[in-house]
Amino acid sequence: MGDVRLEKWADLLVNYSIAAKPGERVLLRGDMLAEPLIKAVYAKILEAGAFPFIYIDIPGTREIFYKLANDSQLAYVPEPLKLAYSTFECMVRIIADENTRALNHVDPSKVKKNTQALRTLQEIYMNRAACGELRWTLTAYPTQAYAQDADMSLEEYSQFVFGAVMPDANDPVGYWRRISARQERIVNWLKGKRNVHLVGKAPICISASKEENSSIAIARRTSRMVKSLPGRSRTASRVMSLFRTRQSIKVGK
């Protein structure tokens, strides 16, 4: 995957998704299989004048952890990671699983205990993102595991991901800025509305209660409605995956 698309992808993540600025601290957390993209993102962070801090997850270490960790180790939250989540201005997360089923036979009680401990980090970054203190984004680097789960070759899956992330390969940042502006107009149009009528072969009405944020509730119910359509084909599933991928382009801004 060593091609110019990686540089453009990195540019999209750094200069659009998190919009890193000079002097800001950026946590760059990724799985080792995503090394080519991690390096490209690292370079873009430096070019932006920001300060990158790399945190790498090595394949196989999670299985070792859940096999050997005692209760106190399962409940431990690494201080450097907590500090980064609590104080850094930006975070880029790149997932790249080698095996999506690696933890299938791990003791679920251990996973639960560790998940509860790490929930502290999740609460920190969600609260900071909500009040504008943290800008973050997440993306998935193509791996054999993801390709197999999608019943595709690695090349096919890579092309799919690049097409989802950068529909306009010549100007991906400009493309998503235009999409963002269009979405903002739709969000503004939805404000104050409680019902949306979708016209098609089978018209559908989606409503939000008085207690809900109307635009968010309507968007969520539309997504659930599409997911629950009968007879969804593999193509439909990939369309939903594409939708989720595009949603993750700019998170927390």
Image (spheres, rainbow, N blue to C red):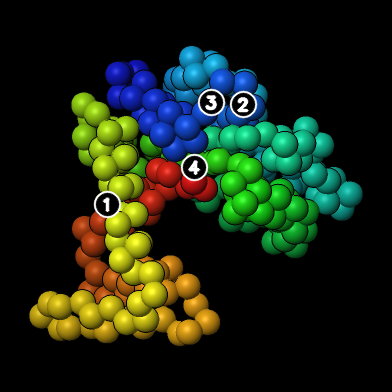
Task: Tell me which residue sits at (43%, 28%) in the image.
Answer: 15
Tag 2 secondary structure: loop
Quick one: 79 or 26, which is closer to the camera? 26
Quick one: 81 or 86, which is closer to the camera? 86
**Pointer 4 or 3: first along the chain:** 3
Q: Which residue is mark 2?
A: 24
The answer to whether 239 appears left or right of 214 in the picture is left
Q: Is residue 66 above or below residue 84?
A: below
Q: Which residue is mark 1?
A: 182
Q: Position of residue 249 (x, y in %)?
A: 40, 43
Do we see residue 59 in this rendering? no
Q: Which residue is mark 3?
A: 21
Residue 194 sits in which quadrant? bottom left
Task: Say whether marks 1 and 3 touch (CB < 8 Å).
Answer: no
Task: Tell me which residue sits at (62%, 31%) in the image.
Answer: 27
**Pointer 2 or 1: first along the chain:** 2
**Pointer 2 or 4: first along the chain:** 2
Dot 2: few (<14), some (14–19), or many (≥20) neighbours within 10 Å?
A: some
User: What's the CA distance linking mark 2 and mark 3?
Assistant: 6 Å
Task: Say whether marks 2 and 3 touch (CB < 8 Å).
Answer: yes
Dot 1: few (<14), some (14–19), or many (≥20) neighbours within 10 Å?
A: few
User: What's the CA distance linking mark 4 and mark 3?
Assistant: 18 Å
User: What's the CA distance linking mark 2 and mark 4?
Assistant: 18 Å
Q: Amino acid at mark 1?
A: Arg
Quick one: 212 or 222, which is closer to the camera? 212
User: What's the CA distance linking mark 1 and mark 3?
Assistant: 25 Å
The answer to whether 123 appears left or right of 173 in the picture is right
Task: Tell me which residue sits at (55%, 41%) in the image.
Answer: 135
Task: Say whether marks 2 and 4 touch (CB < 8 Å).
Answer: no
Q: Which residue is mark 4?
A: 138
